[in-house]
């Protein structure tokens, strides 16, 4: 999915150009990800490296000595090994990407409507469907999506041939209105969609003496990460809290102690120049967290042949978005995955207990 998306983004000007407008610019900053590992976890990083390079990713496996040579400002104490992406890695402005997708879709005839999905209307499947033949199977069909419009008590039924649940962190909640997770195993309705919000903080620090243009996105041995933000000596930093200390999701307040106690000490140890940083600002957002295996859930729900799921990206949904869009489009128009085989990412894996786990994912 990442390789597909990288290729798509390399050609974004052709892919998302709209006739009379300037070509899209998502402020792509080409820079590798440097993932570090202690001796205890080195074998996992090495396995990941092997898999990634077998699949065509250009990644260098670096010893502690090589790391020091390549990044002299890095403290390599307790670092056994690191991997560094040589191609197809970097960061960009996700808002600009979303806007470019939207403009392109509108230019091709898509209509957008702002409202809150509050339920669905279903019917038994029959042969007189507006969905292609391959979707006529067992189960119920979504006839309409119930949408509450802003500033109005009115709920409108939007008739549909297909509905795609892509409500990010709230996807689990949306599917409970269909009874998913509240029925029986025979109906394939006993397993809920395991997606919920998890609060994550992003801190912006200023450090004029920090590493310069060659500073990669660094993931420290304990999962604390940093990357350069622009060219003015600013850095984004953050980390995932341990499972037992997950913050509540009632609001988007930032925990500044988490920066003082966890993020800053880790990064100042790894990059000594960061001892002198100053915290400038911070914000929080919700990860669209798949509580079972932290990977995307893509495909048809087995009990609803015209209900598609595209959710649960657990913090890596932007980089996968071009591949996800293509996969959902293939499912709707062709009834199967064509460009990329994402069968392993389907909801069925929770019914069959064939989870898709990865290591060293933050
Ligand atoms: C701090 C942070 C850092 C991240 N860093 C990265 C990163 O480095 N790389 C990366 O790839 N990803 C990253 N992500 C994850 C990425 O943002 C998500 O995976 C991605 O946005 C998911 O896209 P989505 O379209 O599925 O969901 P979203 O972007 O969450 O969009 C879902 C939309 O559905 C709407 N919605 C919800 N419920 C309803 C309803 N009932 N009716 C109508 N609309 C509804 C929401 O308002 C929202 O607009 C990060 C996330 C956070 C919070």
Image (cartoon, rainbow, N blue to C red):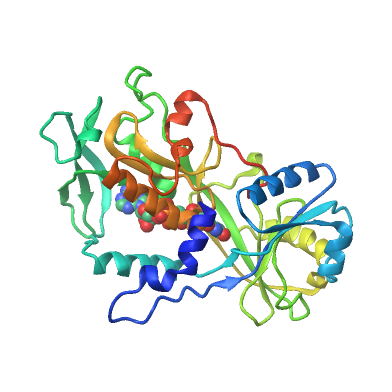
Q: Residue at x 32, y 21 (%)?
A: 187
**Residue 229 drawn at (x, y percent):** 62, 74
Q: Quadrant of residue 102?
A: bottom left
Q: Is residue 3 above or below residue 274?
A: above
**Residue 109, image x, y percentages:** 21, 64
Seen as rendered, the residue at the extreme left is: 128
Q: Ligand 1 falls in which quarter?
A: bottom left
Q: Is residue 159 visible?
A: yes
Against 181, residue 109 (above or below) is: below
Seen in the image, is 34 located left or right of residue 15?
right
Residue drawn at point x = 47 percent, y = 73 percent: 26
Along the viewing direction, whichever of 8 and 94 lies nearer the viewer = 8
Relative to 153, 314 lies left or right: right
| Residue at the image point whose x is 85% and y is 71% from the top | 72
- Number of labels in the image equals 0
How far across and down, in percent of the image, does residue 275 sit? Answer: 81, 70
Where does residue 198 sit, x and y in percent of width and height? 53, 47
Quadrant in the rendering for residue 279: bottom right
Q: State the image quarter where residue 228 is shown.
A: bottom right
In the rendered image, the residue lying farthest to the top is 186
Q: Is residue 215 left or right of residue 156?
A: right
Residue in front for this viewpoint, 256 or 83: 83
Q: Residue at x 61, y 53 (%)?
A: 56
Observer able to see residue 285: no
């Amino acid at each position: 999915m990442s390789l597909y998306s990288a290729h798509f983004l390399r050609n974004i000007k052709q892919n998302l150009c709209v006739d009379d407008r300037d070509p899209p610019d998502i402020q792509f900053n080409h820079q590798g990800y440097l993932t570090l590992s202690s001796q205890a976890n080195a074998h996992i990083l090495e396995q990941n490296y092997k898999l990634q390079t077998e699949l065509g990713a250009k990644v260098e496996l670096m010893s502690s000595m090589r790391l020091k040579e390549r990044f002299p400002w890095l403290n390599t104490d307790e670092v056994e090994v690191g991997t560094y992406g040589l191609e197809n890695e970097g960061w960009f402005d996700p808002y600009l990407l979303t806007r470019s997708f939207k403009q392109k879709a509108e230019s091709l005839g898509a209509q957008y409507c702002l409202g809150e999905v509050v339920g669905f209307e279903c019917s038994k499947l029959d042969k007189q469907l507006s969905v292609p033949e391959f979707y006529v199977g067992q189960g119920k069909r979504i006839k309409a999506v119930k949408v509450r419009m802003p500033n109005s008590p009115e709920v409108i039924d939007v008739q549909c041939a297909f509905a795609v649940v892509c409500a990010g962190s709230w996807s689990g909640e949306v599917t409970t209105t269909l009874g998913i997770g509240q029925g029986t195993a025979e109906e394939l309705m006993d397993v809920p969609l395991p997606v919920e919000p998890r609060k994550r903080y992003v801190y912006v620090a200023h450090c004029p003496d920090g590493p310069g243009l060659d500073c990669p996105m660094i993931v420290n041995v304990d999962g604390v990460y940093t990357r350069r933000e622009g060219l003015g000596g600013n850095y984004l930093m953050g980390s995932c809290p341990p499972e037992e200390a997950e913050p509540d999701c009632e609001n988007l307040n930032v925990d500044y102690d988490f920066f003082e106690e966890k993020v800053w000490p880790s990064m100042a140890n790894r990059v000594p120049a960061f001892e002198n940083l100053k915290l400038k600002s911070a914000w929080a957002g919700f990860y669209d967290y798949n509580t079972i295996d932290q990977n995307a859930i893509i495909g048809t729900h087995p009990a609803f042949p015209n209900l598609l799921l595209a959710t649960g990206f657990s913090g890596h949904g932007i980089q996968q978005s071009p591949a996800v869009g293509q996969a959902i489009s293939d499912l709707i128009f062709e009834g199967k995955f064509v460009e990329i085989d994402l069968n392993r990412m389907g909801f069925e894996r929770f019914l069959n207990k064939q989870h898709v786990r990865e290591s060293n994912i933050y």
